[in-house]
Amino acid sequence: MGSLLLKTSVGRRMRKSVAAARASILREKVQPIDVTRIHGSGDLLTAFRTTSIQARNLGRCLEVWENALTDRKRPTILLGLAGPLIAAGLREVIRDLVDWGLVDVVVSTGAVLYQDLYQGLGGQHWIGTPNADDVRLRSLYLDRIYDTYVDELRFEDADRAIGAITDEFPPRPASSREYLAFLGRKFRDPHSILATAARRGVPVFSPALIDSSIGIGLTLHYQRNRGRPRFILDAVRDNYELVQILSHSPRTAVIYVGGGTPKNWINDGIVMANYAFGREGEGHYYALQITTDVPHWGGLSGSTLDEAQSWGKISPSARRAMAHVDASIGLPLLVGALWDRRRVWQPRRRLAFDWSGDEVKIRTESGSRTRGSAARRR
């Protein structure tokens, strides 16, 4: 009898501890979405935050981005772009991010920027089908990007136009940032990402530029100018310029659309800035990513932002979110929500970059003092 009472008493104590543990976990209910109360993507993504699966993750991405936009330390926001984003119809969405001042630096694959130029030169993306006869498409000089067609003849025209305009660049080494700003000024188009970035003074880098059709144009430029002074793409200068930006930023935020080289390059940049250039700080303070890649294959594009903390690329105290969602769906929802909720982050002061010397100087449009080497030593 005594043993039974002991067991009962212990059981009661155990039940109390379990109840307390359960209460500490079960604190917030999943809230059903009431579509009759949703007015725009801002309301939708705000509601996503109390749902589940990738909807909740996308809602958290919005929260992280808004936190970066409203941080009083004015983080430098870097946007990494990879994937068939222009073919997916996202050209205007990305262009608006630059125009509205929601990002301060763009790092992209060459393919995204090339297709921006291709459209600026009159090329189009056409609705197709993934079940097309690709051999027949080849005979018609049409290229397929999943369910989208592009014009191979227009591609060749764009390649040659890029090569020809590069002949006008001063015959010397330069970073991809300087070269892409040159292209943005030459190929003017109000809908262009590069043209808008050039007009707004937003630096655009492409660390693997030759791995794109822009690289074909540069090869044509090389062919015409063999044995003569010519433009030389200085990839190491890219590294140096990125590290200067990161070193002079009190905080940094990263937004990755896809993964690939842009994600790796930006993350490596903060490591270089921290241990090789004396930057005070630990990794990126804000980080979000939308991707369809997954972590269990070990590739960089799908690797988690938590994993990046082990490398010192993401701060141990970073606010971060990762949504496994197609960019053609996720990015318009995020950017539309930011626009709907612009009262949260407007006005946001832009950064002005002075590239006249070997070391970049950065100031805000309001005229606050330059953030440079002196700021880094504080």
Image (spheres, grey):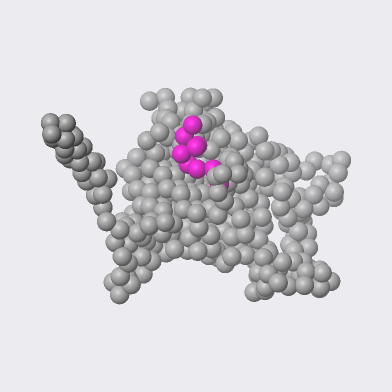
Q: Residue at x 44, y 57 (%)?
A: 54
Q: Position of residue 149 (x, y in %)?
A: 69, 70
63 on left or right of 234: left
Left-right relation of 355 to 220:
left
Q: Is residue 192 above or below residue 263?
A: below
Q: Nearer the viewer, residue 70 or 352?
A: 70
Q: Position of residue 80 (x, y in %)?
A: 54, 48
Name the one closer to the observer, 150 or 178. 150
Furthest toward the right, the residue is 227
Point out the image quarter for the N terminus: top left
| Residue at 46% from the left image edge and 49% from the top image edge | 322
Q: Position of residue 8 (x, y in %)?
A: 16, 37
Q: Is residue 228 magenta?
A: no
Task: Indicate the quadrant where residue 345 lies.
Answer: bottom left
Q: Which part of the image, by quadrant, shows the C terminus?
A: top left
State the extent of the magenta-drawn residues as a range.
302-310
Residue depicted at x 74% and y 50%: 215
Which of 289 and 246 lies nearest the eye of the viewer? Answer: 289
Left or right? Give the position of 164 relative to 27. right
Residue positioned 67% across, 38% down in the render = 235
Q: Residue furthest front?
A: 1
Q: Is residue 53 left or right of residue 266?
A: left
Report the number of numbered marks. Answer: 0
Locate residue 131, reporting x and y percent. Answer: 70, 72
328 and 297: which is toward the camera: 297
Q: Is residue 101 visible?
A: no
Q: Is residue 253 in view from this perspective?
A: yes
